[in-house]
Amino acid sequence: MLGVPAANIIMVNATNLPDDPNVEWKAPVVANLILHTVESLDIQAICTFDRDGVSQHPNHSAVYFAAASLCLANLLPKGRYIYSDQLHQFDSRGMLLKKAS
């Protein structure tokens, strides 16, 4: 998927992060998971939802804000190629247009 080797695909089973639009994911918790993954693998870019998430899903937005906070705070490891201009985000508006057609 997106050129990512299967060995580098990580499924997170965190009971404090249920797939539920009624449960707010805390950005610092998600940021810690992202940072751990970036430090563990040779990550060169982060792809995330935009700030609105798909269909205004709050968990999607939490992923965006967590990744953005890491970039803004310069917490990502030095020597990696992840800077705020390399935080790729999926445009929710395009997804909503696709769902509507």
Image (spheres, rainbow, N blue to C red):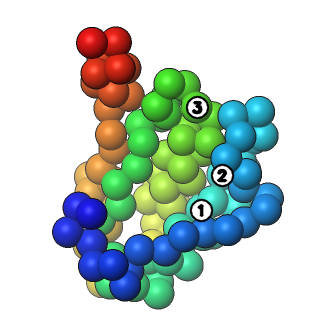
Q: Residue furthest left?
A: 3
Query: In whole angstroms, how far apart are the C-alphas of marks 3 and 2?
Result: 14 Å
Q: Secondary structure at mark 2?
A: helix
Circle 3 is placed at which residue position? 57
Q: Could you tell me residue 64's position as x and y percent?
A: 49, 46
Q: Are marks 3 and 2 in contact (CB under 8 Å)?
A: no
Q: Amino acid at mark 2?
A: Ala
Q: Could you tell me residue 40's position as x and y percent?
A: 47, 87
* Quadrant where the image shows the C terminus: top left
Circle 2 is placed at which residue position? 27
Judged left or right of residue 69, residue 87 is left
* Front-lying residue, 20 or 38: 20
Q: Is residue 80 visible?
A: no
Q: Residue at x 35, y 20 (%)?
A: 99
Examine the rendered structure and indicate whether residue 17 appears above or below residue 99: below
Q: Is residue 11 visible?
A: yes
Query: In whole angstroms, how far apart are the C-alphas of marks 1 and 2?
Result: 6 Å
* Front-lying residue, 24 or 71: 24
Q: Secondary structure at mark 3?
A: loop
Q: Could you tell me residue 63's position as x and y percent?
A: 54, 49
Q: Residue at x 54, y 70 (%)?
A: 11
Number of labelled discs?
3
Circle 1 is placed at which residue position? 31
